[in-house]
Amino acid sequence: MKLFNRRSPLWACAALALSTPAFANDGYHLWLGEPRGEAASATVELAGDSPTLQIAADELRRNLPTLDRPVMLARASDPALAGLPIDTRALGTEGYRVQSATIGGKAVTLVTGATDTAILYGAFALLRHLNSGGDPAKIELASAPETKLRILNHWDNLDGVVERGYSGQSLWDWWVLPDFKDPRYADYARANASLGINGTVLNNVNAKSDSLTAPYIAKAAALADVFRPYGIKVYLSARFSAPIELGGLKTADPRDPAVAAWWKAKADEIYRAIPDFGGFLVKANSEGQPGPRDYGASHGDGANMLAAAVKPHGGIVMWRAFVYADTDPDDRAKQAYTEFKPLDGTFADNVLVQVKNGAIDFQPREPFHPLFGAMPKTPLIAEFQITKEYLGFATHLAYLGPMFEEVLDAQTGVRRGETVASVVTGKADRHTLSGMAGVANIGRDRDWSGGTFNQANWYVFGRLAWDPTLSSEEIAREWAAQTYGNDPVIIDTVVKMMMRSREAVVDYTGPLGLAHLFASGHHYGPGPWVSDLGRPEWNPVYYHRADKNGIGFDRTRTGSNAVAQYAPSIAKRYADPKTTPPEELLWFHHLPWDYKMPGGNTLWEELVRRYDRGVAEVAAMRAQWATLKPKIDAERWTKTDVFLGVQQREALWWRDASLAYWMSLNGLKLPAGSAAPQHSLEHYKQVRFAYPPGNPQ
Ligand code: GCW
């Protein structure tokens, strides 16, 4: 027996003795909180039985506060519900309803839905309601997901390294799978189910074909067995050249019948081990990955060939549109659209094209990808990056909710009222397939995501994938309440910090629509001066185009004309610097340093003002966090405090290095009141890191 566990009185005494305000908390339990323990828990009754219903019941027994009536979990088809005034028609297969009801003469809180997974989602919704300050006397919850596929993409390599992962090694311990199933796998599934996430791609899109061999299929099957009762399907990233590497074929040309037959046999083999296997995710002809273009075939040929292999089993293919080529001299921001738009209407009905939120690459801010709205005949799955490759890794505090929301709420201009969200939910074009994918920030760190605030990004992704019209601020509130407790002072402070945090990162790394100014490879620190990398579009100078006269990328008619990829009303707005939002200005326009901004500042003055604002914002977040010290457990408080210290130092580094570089080009002085960079430009150019995490070596 352990000397004490977190629930024992001894532990409580230890916590009190250290005068911590709450129980110690290492973040393992995420937003779901420490189990309350049986004594305090509600009575839960089950009509029916299945592993999923058992999980739902256990969850409520462990975590629900005592209610004045029992909770009953029952399928909508249960005869006991017949005749009750409960409308479950609009709920589909995954929607839930939680409400008071009288069943067999007994007053209960009923959790119902068409399937057991729906009931599990309802159980988590009830917990969320009560643990984020909802009224126990007023329980009336009903929701159905707006998207069909709510999927995490793990960029996990088979050797345990997570590409762009900042929270430790991969969770998947491939070496000891399938024999040993780490209990964390169920906790992972539980956390995802609490948000309605219903799929996970286990391996990196920069895929190895080994994951398609029999031993690895067996390992993936073991994970699928753990995830199944939580309503989560397993998917794999497929390496397009696998028929050559594993099958001994001479080609992977999708038009070759032997290649198609190989994939069909492979799919059959996978489905024998994982009957509910979700399907494949493919990165093809992008950043050195093999693909159909190697053979003169199109992305459509490649996707459809794979789609045919999984189709008999009900599987799907998610084909990524993240393509750009060194052989194409056109603006990188245009290449995905140029390649994919003409393919609209050619994809099989079990293919989704997976489109990153912006046209370049997960920058702190990008205008929405022009493919949204441009491929009405193809279901598009939006890909967001939860892990913060370009936003300070796990160390910098950046709540991504406002960024996801900004993209989802963007008007495509194709039809009145059409937003990226309505494209992604399939509503705009009446697709039955729809989805959102998030590049996971999960690793083997005890707190899963390398810090409590990073957990909020996993949380907000899941919540928005369920319903892309939810408010990121509301989500921040419910997350904060569940994570830190229902104290209004904590919630208000934490939400305030979160809501400004991403804009702060934009301000100190790349304000006014600047993008991709990162040091080479690892994408952590500043490197706006970098100009010596092999391909033009790998260099920051390609993106900012600054010289002594001006700065910014001209994407109007006088430049790359990327604006023309948007619907006319949007293109018109972006074509003129006066109607382009300042936040996106230099993304679309090359402007002189003395260009007059709204408000009267010159472009240079405004740029400096925003760098300064970003730095000040981090200092403010740190001060706000300091006020919570007496209210938050020491372990989680300290880690965030230390990280905010790092962020404060590094925000200044970003600002100083960037300004030193811009000044070396434009020869301008800093506006009055703005401090000179601490070091010379040469100093910043010399900064090197050894072994930054997440960087493919
Ligand atoms: O953001 C870039 C990353 C690569 C990644 C690529 C992609 C998996 O720097 O590490 O590769 O995007 O999305 O394919």
Image: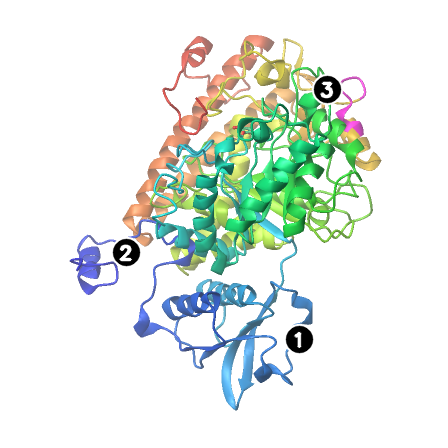
Q: Which residue is mark 1?
A: 87
Amino acid identity at mark 2: Pro
x, y (%) of residue 550? Answer: 66, 14
- Gap between marks 1 and 3 measured at Cα: 54 Å
Mark 3 Cα within 10 Å, few/some/many (few <14, many 20+)? many
**Which contiguous range is marked in magenta?**
557-564
Considering only order in the chain, which callout, 2 or 1, is on the residue closer to the N terminus? 2
Between 88 and 553, the one nearer to me in the picture: 88
Q: Is mark 3 within 8 Å of ligand 1?
A: no
x, y (%) of residue 36? Answer: 33, 66
Between 380 and 79, the one nearer to me in the picture: 79
Mark 2 Cα within 10 Å, few/some/many (few <14, many 20+)? some
Q: Nearer the viewer, mark 1 or mark 2?
A: 1
Q: Quadrant of residue 560?
A: top right
Name the element at disc 2: loop
Q: Quadrant of residue 321?
A: top right
Q: Is residue 18 above or below residue 143?
A: above
- Gap between marks 3 and 2 measured at Cα: 54 Å
Q: Is residue 596 visible?
A: no
Q: Nearer the viewer, mark 3 or mark 2?
A: 3
Amino acid identity at mark 3: Asp
The residue under the point 66% across, 56% down is 146
Name the element at disc 3: loop
Residue 385 among magenta residues: no
Q: Which residue is mark 3?
A: 554
